[in-house]
Amino acid sequence: MVSSSNLGFPRMSANRELKKLVEAYWAGKVDHQALVDGAKELRALHWKIQKDAGIEFIPSNDYSLYDHVLDHLFVFGAIPSRYANIPSSTDKYFAMGRGLQRPAEGIDVPAMEMKKWFDTNYHYIVGEFSPATKFHLQDTKPVDQYLEAKALGIQTRPVILGPVSFLALGKESSDAPAGFDRMSLLDSLLPVYVELLTKLQAAGAEWVQVDEPILALDRPAEYKAYFAKAYTTITAAAPQLKFFLASYFGRYSSNLDFVADLPIHAIHIDAVRAPGDVDIVVSRVQGKTLKVSVGVVNGRNIWKNNLAQSIETVKRVIAAVGSDRVIVAPSCSLLHTPHSLASEKKMDAQIKNWMAFSVEKLHEIVTIVKAITAPGSVDAILAENAHAHELRKTSPLIHNPEVQAELKAIVPENFRRQSKFEVRAQKQQQKLNLPLYPTTTVGSFPQTKEVRVARQKFKKGETTLAQYNEFINSEIQKAVKFQEEVGLDMLVHGEFERNDMVEYFGENLKGYVFSEYGWVQSYGSRCVKPPIIFGDVSRPYAMTVETSVYAQSLTKLPMKGMLTGPVTMLQWSFVRDDQPRSETTYQIALALRKEVSDLAKAGIPAIQIDEPAIREGLPLLKEDQDAYLDWAVKSFLLATTDVPDETQIHTHMCYSDFNDIFPAIQALDADCITIENSKSDLKLLRAFEKYGYTNGIGPGLYDIHSPRVPPADEMKSRLNAINKYIKTNLLWVNPDCGLKTRGWTETEAALRNMCEVAKQARSAP
Ligand code: GLN
Ligand code: ZN
């Protein structure tokens, strides 16, 4: 019979209980036992939710106090030596994730590197491997948690990260000899996997879910050999265990050639991201016995599943391989969707009726199974689901004919500035008369406690809009005066009115809705609550013009308008799934285009449109990347080109490695791009030089993630180094990113040093 399965459940729980628990432990407010007990309770609750929903294959070991990749590093003893003298193993574990400073005990260790988990907004801890890495099973978390569930009467399928992904997702440690390849550790790693799997088998596990998400990436041919060796070894060592191999977030592509021949017992398909894989995998496994897990329920989004369509897909697989070989599942772990819709009390009921969070998704999976195994038993649910989809197709809340007409009216000229950069630069210089090495900042100034309290009071209705605006204006006044005093050349208003660069615009645009509890883990205890784009996006009124005009009225120096770009607005939200992402982005771009144009008309001489997320939207497979970059660049151009040559367009990017997308960055045709650079060893600038980037560029002179004030000399030598790669007439001087997480004292000291360095550079012979 076809069965139901889950691949992983969100860890935070309904009200971010896990976050509160670990943060209380870090703060010394609860002890170790309370941490252990609290997490155990949450796991029990989550298993029960899954069991009560009727899920047959329930995962265990998907739970983590910080990150599942860190868990594996810990379990396999891959702990860098700098953490060796931390006595408590729990403290050691958290130190790897977030660093630890205990001066009295002589402990001061930074965290391990964190990286984005594929194209999600979840970050994992990057393993460090060298010839000195000696794997051993130093912790039995996967077995313990399997037994924990078993004691509650719940048979689970432990989830482990597969050995090939475990190594591939790490990096060579800095002390590894040149030419060392971490994949060469596979031979010494496999015995530890064998030991773990043997223990799971002995504990009574029937299935184990082995995640190998690197199968969704372009991989060199030698991976085939790693997979063959790894899976022959581990399956032979635990012959009673059945192996469920899961990749997600994309297609298997050519990897399927060897994956289907591995000695595994089930293979999972992300049928949302890779619908085409369903038929390909099915035909590839004909004549074999392995089961096919069809991931039809989207684990990356918050929309109701189209149950009729999913049932169709599952039936097609059943027809090909027989119902005993089919499993219904989410497309990936539900880690990337919020806990449950049940807590959402304020959301518009119609919009809420189009959504499903994790708990609701479990019910969808079970409904799909029941519709097939007991026809007629879930008819009412299916009818309701069909009705919700019908409403969504036609609802005037979603569909705005005006926006659609505007989209259709876009012509190629809408993606171009009037003149090319050299011409614009001259006109802008005539107007702005900036010195060489012009200094500026990236946008935000410290969001102090007073700023946050003022906003909360206003949101709670304790102060009036007029009072709140007055407060914001006084902050802007202070910021403008401050910038004049420290000697900046191009000013910003400081973003005091913004809680978050995406949320602020989402709250002002039509087509967005906000949840109260829709939190998703980003890293460690940190969660984000992405805005939800449910309908056609439009701009009901000018959003920033008044503020920017006010800020400009306070100074003779040029003021930079400040907006968030269309791709970042998309990337950091949950996006509607009833039209291509590109179309939604164009809608946002059209709304921003009006804002940019209005700012220019109101006399704002420079406008910055931040796109920090443009790189992270890049598809995982090379063959899909050009199409994405094409619409991403066009969206930026659509947003920014309805201005005269004299208006200077800035953009800003951070936390990314742009080396592979230079042509796209050039194509944005911004008059100035400020980038995070101070930590990247000039590697990035060498690449800009090599590529021959032609427009203005402001490589960050100092890191804003730390309260440390960089001495002038340090910034001076950095600027000298930068100057070797970037022509002086293109160069801007600025910090790495916005200053909202900093305090005023260090901000002042750092910016004074920075402006001083620019002044000296101007007067140097
Ligand atoms: N303008 C934004 C700020 O300064 C940019 C933030 C970002 O790049 N993440 O806060
Ligand atoms: Zn930034």
Image: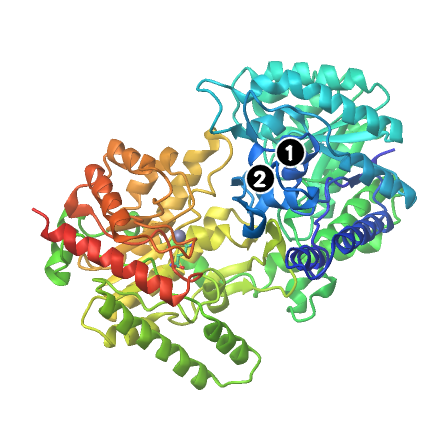
Residue 577 shows up from this direction: no
SS under mark 2 = strand
> Relative to 497, does residue 288 appear above or below in the rendering?
above
Q: Position of residue 701 (x, y in %)?
A: 30, 49
Taking the spot 87% from the left edge, 44% from the top edge, the residue there is 375
Dot 1 and dot 2 residues touching (CB under 8 Å): yes
Camera-side residue of 483 and 31: 31
Camera-side residue of 123 and 380: 123
Give, as a three-letter code, the residue at label 2: Ile
Q: Which mark is residue 374?
A: none
Taking the spot 24% from the left edge, 52% from the top edge, the residue there is 733
Determine which residue is flagged by label 2. Answer: 125
Q: Position of residue 289 (x, y in %)?
A: 80, 19
Q: Position of residue 387 (x, y in %)?
A: 72, 58
Give, as a three-letter code, the residue at label 1: Leu
Looking at the rendered image, the quarter that the N terminus falls into is top right
